[in-house]
Image (spheres, rainbow, N blue to C red):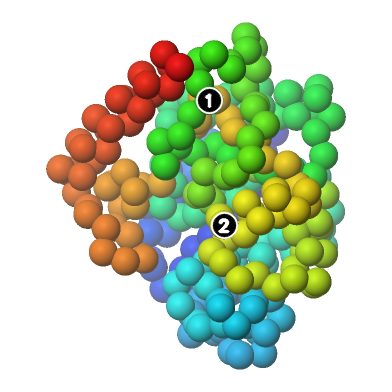
Amino acid sequence: MLIRTYVIHVSTEIGRRKLIEKELEGKAFDPTFVLDGDINSLSQSRLNTFFSDKMKEPKAGTSCAFKHILAYQDIVKNKHPLTLIIEDDIRFYSNVHLLDQIFNEIQDRNLKSFIVSLEDSRLKYIPKSKREKKRLLYLEQSGRMTGAYLIDYAGAKHILDYIETKKVSVPIDWFHNECIQENILEMFWAQPPIAVQGSLEGSVKSLIGKVRFGGLKILLFRIQRLYKRLTYYFR
């Protein structure tokens, strides 16, 4: 089964597009690249539709949030029951096949209006003491960034409805946390995670801010990741 997938992507970043297309090769993803919403296309009238004054400056974080919102609109317009949203620097682990089990668990538990965080870019995990045999999804009170997550139709619809009454005033990952606090949707973490943002791992150059990039960054990140995984395992 092909997984409906939205790729958050800056249209002029040809190199990053080649990298993510290579990453998606051989996987059961049906990608749609979200190309609208680049910084240079963010007129004040477009920004006024979704954002409060705090986020109305056309910059990278606003553009990223705008593209996620466009994905939600397309999900609702086409009534997609469950979709994958990824940013174009995402890297999947070898356990990406666990997506099939995650889909089954979503169906078996009859989850509605949710996001499933699939990444460990911030090195946050479910403690071993809370893990259950054969369970992959755990209810949490915050997200783990927006590099890779599943969202259902109800979750996308509720987010858009909420934006109509209260504009987005923070980056998109923080906005997800706001929606959780307001009981707009539920957040589940996948344990184990199946992806990481390459710009945080060091394998992809970041487009936002000066973030270390290259072999040393990758090595340091992997050491820290191993340490964090062991730490959470013994909790």
> Secondary structure under badge 1?
loop
Rendered residue at 61%/71% (across/down): 169
- First of labels 2, 1 by sequence position: 1
Is the residue marked by circle 1 packed among few (<14), some (14-19), or many (20+) residues within 10 Å? many
Residue projecting furthest to the top: 133
Instruction: Tell me residue 110's x, y (percent).
Output: 84, 29
Q: Residue at x 65, y 27 (%)?
A: 137
Q: Report whether 86 appears left or right of 187.
A: left
Quarter of the image for residue 12 reads bottom left
x and y, in percent, of residue 43 in the image: 59, 89
Q: Do the residues labelled 2 and 1 touch (CB within 8 Å)?
A: no
Residue 11 left/right relative to 163: left
Dot 2 corresponds to which residue?
A: 174
**Mark 2 residue element:** helix
Task: Give residue 126's mark.
Answer: 1
Image quarter (top left, top right, bottom left or bottom right) of the C terminus: top left
- Residue 216, relative to residue 49: is it above or below? above
* Residue ID at (78%, 64%): 162
Q: Which amino acid does label 1 sit on?
A: Ile
Q: Quadrant of residue 3?
A: top right
Q: How crowded is mark 2: few (under 14 residues within 10 Å), some or many (20 or more)?
A: some
Residue 144: % across, % down: 52, 43
Q: Is residue 53 visible to the viewer in this orientation of the structure? A: yes
Q: 195 and 30: which one is in front?
A: 195
- Position of residue 111 measured from the top left corner of the image (x, y, whole percent): 80, 33
Q: Name the residue type under label 2.
A: Trp
